[in-house]
Image: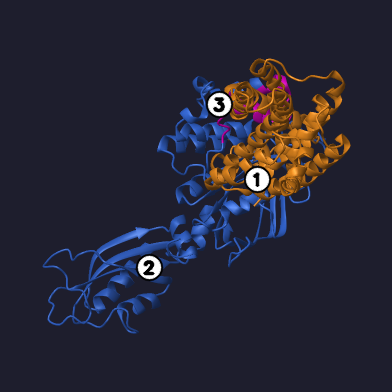
């Protein structure tokens, strides 16, 4: 141990030799070329995922239902047998040495899997006993965690009498009883009310601050953006993107967006044609992508006859256009207005926007229902 | 505000591995604590049926003269065997069916730092202990219902050896069935597997006397419960014709071996996707 170690370097554990100040941060989770194939399924549930999570990070796995998030957690927590690839948690290969690995991580699963034959407090105490926490320590830790999770008055209650949010809190408290280095949270706030959700988020931030590595799966963009230091977007068993939430939204075609509601003359050319409005807008400098969305009703006049071939319709054709831009949206306002005017159209509404994680998500995983 | 630099600091140092025996005892202790609240369930599950079998066959039929007076002493050892196997089977099969389908509450134990096979073995051991407890209870019950039971101190070692193997047989069979059967088929299992098992196990009749019904004798030889019943009679009523005890114990041990293997395999299959 050198005397020059930064005073704030380790907040979680008493100092250990061997990790000098210059050493790179330890890797808490490492997944390499992970494949999981279930028998009699046409596609791999996990299809070659690789990522690394440094110790002390909150890492989010974001993906639609059935993307392979839970299966990935299953492999990392020794509950699912990998078909191929490597999974290492806290420096231990979970396939080669599942028993040692289990001592180092904890899992909070999507479903309530609390022991219904035991009380709330017994759930915590027995969990600690399974993990060989010394007998004297178990009760003390249980009472501390129950108080911290607002469950002190529920400690003698049976599990069936708990609400969904309370059960969720008991599961997290139970997971912390053996002081894990790595915590896996599988969709922790699905089905929780906003208060319970914020409570869980606060606990996750506290854990991060105390040095626990947290891997959290979610399909909630707000949750990923609010909690995760880095986010991996998963779909069809593959990792599509991995970066900080801010960087992910920056890498989306267009770091900002411009949404336009345009009214076009009904007898004008089809805006989607080669020389139509959309093509012209797409050719403007700094415009990276153009999408259209179904437009709302015309702001004035009779019900809009917006079908292109409709003869004799006097109403204008409504189009909502979204431009993804490489530069600040205000710089494009003038050229866009000129182009719209050149097509005989009118700008009814203009909205500046920055892409959200949701835009990244939809961009990468598509709009299809799962 | 705590900087993110401090966050990376938790040292992932090796921890001493937890010893499996300690974890195993913790798992066992959990089941004991839960069972203390379930005493009535144990009694109802395992003892009601044997109690009425003893009462009707050993007391009522002999009193009415449809069975000989000595029949109660042939019946009692077999009914103890039946109680032990039935209790062991139910104690291991029923919770497993629920655990692996609805409640998933066994997950916390599967994630304990202990090999999965030991979690399964704990289930078998605990079901066997529960069954032996029910078997012990049958002695005062038998004494009460029948007004007297066969008892030989010299037969005690054989009785204990047979009962431990019989309890393990029931528990291992329960694990095999409990990990193979979906909850929707529990009642079918009881009808199709349990009932024939209980009535072809020579609990109500000595096996050698079946030579007058040769095909049934062959059939009962395929049921491990037969060997347990025969061991119990050899221990308690050696005057009644019975199989060689060493042969019975050997057959029982073989059944325990085979069914433990299938049970542990089934458990491992359900424990890991």
- Foreground disc of the pair 3, 1: 1
The residue that label 3 is drawn on is A120
Q: Quadrant of residue A236?
A: bottom right
Q: Considering only order in the chain, which callout, 2 or 3, is on the residue closer to the N terminus? A: 3
Which is nearer the eye, A287 or B212? Answer: B212
Give the camera-side residue of B52 and B93.
B52
Image depth: mark 3 or mark 2 in front: 3
Q: Position of residue A312 (x, y in %)?
A: 12, 81
**Chain part drawn in magenta:** A114-138
Please say if the residues under marks 3 and 1 sit with CB atoms less than 8 Å apart.
no
Residue B36 occupies quadrant: top right
In the rendered image, which residue does mark 1 sit on? B177
Q: Is residue A306 left or right of residue B38?
A: left
| Camera-side mark, 2 or 1 | 1
Q: What chain letter is assigned to the residue under label 1?
A: B
Instruction: Write down the residue under mark 2.
Output: A323
Chain B, hue in figure: orange
* Chain of the residue on which disc 3 is drawn: A
Q: The chain shown in blue is which?
A: A
Q: Is residue A345 above or below residue A171?
A: below
Report helix, strand or loop for mark 2: strand
Left or right: A217 in relation to B250 = left
* Residue B178 visible in this rendered orientation of the protein: no
Spatial distance from mark 3 to mark 2, Cα to Cα?
A: 53 Å
Residue B176, how many percent across, how many down?
68, 45
Give the residue drawn at x 64%, y 52%. Answer: B273
């Amino acid at each position: 141990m050198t005397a020059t170690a930064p005073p704030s370097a380790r907040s979680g554990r008493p100092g250990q030799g061997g990790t000098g100040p210059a050493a790179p941060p330890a890797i808490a989770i490492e997944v390499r070329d992970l494949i999981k194939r279930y028998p009699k399924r046409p596609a791999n549930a996990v299809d070659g995922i690789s990522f690394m999570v440094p110790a002390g990070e909150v890492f989010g796995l974001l993906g639609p239902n059935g993307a392979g998030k839970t299966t990935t957690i299953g492999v990392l927590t020794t509950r699912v047998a990998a078909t191929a690839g490597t999974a290492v948690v806290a420096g231990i290969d979970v396939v080669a040495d599942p028993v040692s690995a289990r001592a180092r991580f904890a899992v909070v699963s999507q479903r309530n899997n609390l022991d219904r034959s035991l009380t709330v407090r017994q759930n915590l105490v027995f969990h600690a006993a399974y993990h060989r926490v010394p007998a004297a320590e178990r009760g003390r830790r249980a009472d501390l965690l129950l108080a911290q999770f607002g469950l002190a008055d529920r400690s003698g209650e049976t599990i069936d009498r708990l609400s969904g949010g309370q059960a969720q809190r008991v599961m997290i408290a139970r997971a912390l009883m053996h002081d894990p280095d790595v915590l896996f949270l599988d969709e922790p706030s699905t089905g929780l009310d906003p208060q319970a959700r914020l409570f869980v988020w606060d606990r996750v931030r506290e854990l991060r601050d105390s040095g626990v590595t947290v891997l959290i799966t979610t399909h909630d963009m707000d949750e990923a953006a609010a909690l995760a230091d880095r986010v991996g977007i998963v779909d069809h068993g593959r990792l599509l993107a991995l970066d900080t939430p801010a960087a992910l939204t920056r890498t989306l075609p267009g770091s900002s967006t411009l949404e336009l509601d345009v009214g076009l003359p009904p007898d004008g050319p089809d805006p989607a044609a080669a020389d139509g409005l959309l093509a012209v807008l797409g050719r403007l400098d700094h415009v990276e992508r153009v999408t259209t969305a179904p437009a709302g009703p015309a702001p004035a006049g009779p019900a809009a006859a917006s079908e292109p071939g409709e003869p004799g319709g006097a109403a204008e054709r409504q189009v909502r256009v979204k431009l993804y831009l490489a530069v600040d949206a205000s710089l494009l306002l003038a050229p866009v207005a000129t182009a719209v005017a050149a097509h005989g159209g009118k700008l009814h509404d203009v909205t500046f926007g920055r892409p959200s994680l949701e835009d990244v998500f939809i961009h990468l995983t598509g709009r299809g229902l799962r | 505000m705590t900087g993110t630099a401090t966050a990376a600091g938790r040292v992932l140092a090796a921890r001493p591995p937890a010893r499996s025996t300690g974890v195993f005892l913790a798992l066992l202790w959990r089941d004991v604590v839960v069972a203390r609240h379930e005493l009535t369930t144990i009694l109802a599950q395992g003892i009601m049926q044997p109690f009425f079998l003893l009462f009707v066959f050993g007391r009522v039929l002999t009193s009415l003269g449809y069975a000989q007076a000595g029949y109660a002493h042939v019946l009692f050892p077999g009914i103890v065997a039946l109680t032990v196997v039935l209790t062991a089977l139910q104690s291991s099969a029923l919770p497993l069916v629920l655990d692996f389908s609805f409640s998933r509450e066994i997950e916390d134990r599967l994630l304990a730092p202990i090999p999965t096979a030991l979690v399964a073995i704990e289930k078998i051991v605990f079901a066997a202990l529960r069954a032996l407890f029910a078997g012990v209870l049958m002695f005062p019950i038998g004494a009460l219902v029948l007004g007297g039971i066969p008892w030989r101190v010299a037969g005690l070692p054989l009785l204990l050896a047979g009962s431990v193997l019989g309890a393990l047989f029931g528990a291992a069979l329960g694990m095999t069935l409990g990990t193979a059967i979906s909850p929707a088929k529990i009642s079918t299992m009881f009808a199709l597997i349990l009932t024939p098992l209980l009535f072809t196990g020579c609990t109500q009749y000595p096996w050698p006397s079946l030579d007058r019904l040769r095909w049934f004798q062959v059939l009962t030889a395929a049921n491990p419960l037969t060997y347990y019943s025969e061991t119990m009679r050899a221990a308690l009523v050696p005057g009644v014709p019975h199989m060689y005890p060493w042969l019975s114990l050997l057959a029982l041990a073989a059944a325990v071996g085979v069914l433990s293997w299938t049970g542990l395999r089934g458990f491992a299959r359900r424990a890991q996707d």
